[in-house]
Amino acid sequence: MAVPALPLALAGRADLAVYTMLGSFITSFGRNLPYARRARVLAVVAVAMTACVGCGSALAEWAQPRDGGAGAAVTVAAMALVAAAAKFACDAARLSGLGAVLLLFAFAVAAYGSTDPSDVPVQTALAATGAAVAWLLAVLGWFVHPDRPQRLAVAAALRELADLWEAAGAGGGRGLVRHRATAAVLQAYRTLGVQPPTGAERDGRGDTCLRLTDLAWALLIVAARRAPDDPHGPARSLRRQAGILVGRRRRLPRMVPELAALSRTVGSLTAPSPTAPDPAAPAGLRAAEARASELVTGRGHGSAARTAVLTVPALRMFLGTGLAGAAALPLGLGHGYWAAISAAAVLHSVNVRTAAQRAAQRTLGTMAGLLLALGILAARPEPVVLVVVIVVMEFLLEYVVARNYGLGVVFLTPLALLLTDLAAPSPAGDLVQDRALSSLLGVGIALVCALSVVHDRAAVRARRALVACRAASGRAERALAEGPVASFPAAQEQLAAAVVELRAADDAAAGELWPAEIDPTELAAAERRAYLLLELFARPR
């Protein structure tokens, strides 16, 4: 954000620096992806962000929304369409974070900006420049630590395994801990681009990251089979190895001695017989993976079902942002589009329960952020200082929002206010008042939309996940009964993916008003059956 913005501020065009900052928001996407995929994802997002700024600038020149009237109404409708499309696209691409909100924010700031026709190409080019600089900086890490995203994914899996190992030793409830550990290990394998080990693969696969992930998979099985005698020793070793992984050394050292010994012990417990088959051919594995993906995501039931699951959250987003923006028009708020953005932030959630949580967090965070913004604006900083403060706020926002959304809003609020003031200076009191009223209006309307648009999509997903888990368990049982078959590796992986999806779908359905009507004992039985089958895969043939 600072690299393209500071030169413009120093040149006396701090108002134009806003558009490079909007382009820089692309680094909020795909931050945990491996560099090759991150480069592709950020390139697409950069085009989308630039298009939002360009279309918003063109709309500002054509509709003149600041003058009110029909132009303002057209702009509100356009914001609702952008928010819904961004929500649909981000959900379809499984991009986490505040993706749709950032795209809407870029469009809205540009739409309420300059109305000079000559500024449209300039603002679009500046947004593209900011996005290009951000893309370059986001992938430069490949030259320093090309495997760092993979290391972080494996380290996360090891930490979750340490929690599971300790929970197994304590003999307490392990359901949620085991779910998190299984999901983390599968995510590590996906990041590495491989599958869980089977057969002759188990010994000596690849580099240290892959061997550690194989060990995590084996520990997952052993922890499900029996309570360890000394859970704290392995847990400490796992966390110590995770600390080594997240270090900044370019060359990754070998496993710590305790884990190397544990790996040999676990290998002796779970190693298959010498007659176990070689892994399946790549073509067969790809077919099995595709079938597993269909079962877990619902694509096997037709594209219409998949589209319906994505459409309802997008519809909520469209209604919430549109109604919030429309309600702000008769109130005469100077920055009424903040109401639409506040509604989008609340509705950019998984279900009604998380929407209500976000509404409360956003209200409290906004109040604290307004006090911070008022103090900054009261000091009347120079444009260059204002740019530096915005960069600091962005850094603090990105650092804390992944840990607590409410704390993130504390820094998001002054960030939005300062960007607006940089583009078009206004009295501090008016900015703070507009932001407070718009936020309350947007949050209230978002809650009404979340409670009004009641649907059964989450319940359908939960029921489908239960059927898919049972089907994956049935295929796993047949594979185990038949012995050496080509689908053995894929049956193991798709069973793990299905049981993880089962827990995630049930949690999502629990936060909606429409009940899934699934007997909890059925879900628990299906989950236990799946984990017992995963254990059987690791036993000697």
Image: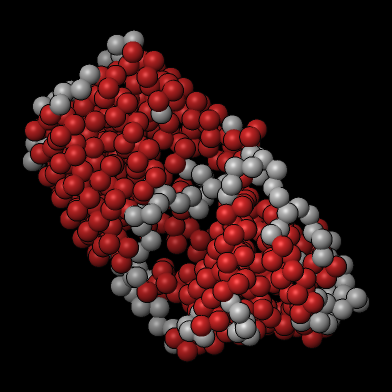
Judged left or right of residue 349, residue 47 is right
Please tell me whether residue 425 is drawn above or below residue 182 in the rendered image.
above
Q: Nearer the viewer, residue 198 or 377?
A: 377
Residue 68 is at least partly visible in this image: no
- Residue drawn at point x = 19 percent, y = 36 percent: 373
Q: Quadrant of residue 213?
A: bottom right
Please tell me whether residue 59 is drawn above or below residue 105 in the rendered image.
above
Residue 269 is at least partly visible in this image: yes
Count of picture labels: 0
Residue furthest out toward the top: 11
Q: How is the image coloured?
A: secondary structure
Q: Nearer the viewer, residue 378 or 128?
A: 378
Question: In the image, residue 311 lies at what x, y percent?
Answer: 41, 56
The N terminus: image quadrant = top left
The C terminus: image quadrant = bottom right
Please tell me whether residue 177 is drawn above or below residue 120 in the rendered image.
below
- Residue drawn at point x = 46 percent, y = 47 percent: 89
- Residue drawn at point x = 77 percent, y = 71 percent: 264
Judged left or right of residue 335, residue 200 is right
Judged left or right of residue 382, residue 270 is right
Question: In the image, residue 88 lies at what x, y percent?
Answer: 43, 50
- Residue drawn at point x = 59 percent, y = 35 percent: 141
Question: In the image, residue 186 lies at what x, y percent?
Answer: 62, 63
Please tell me whether residue 365 is drawn above or below residue 145 in the rendered image.
below
Question: In the image, residue 374 lies at what x, y percent?
Answer: 14, 35
Judged left or right of residue 152, residue 475 is right
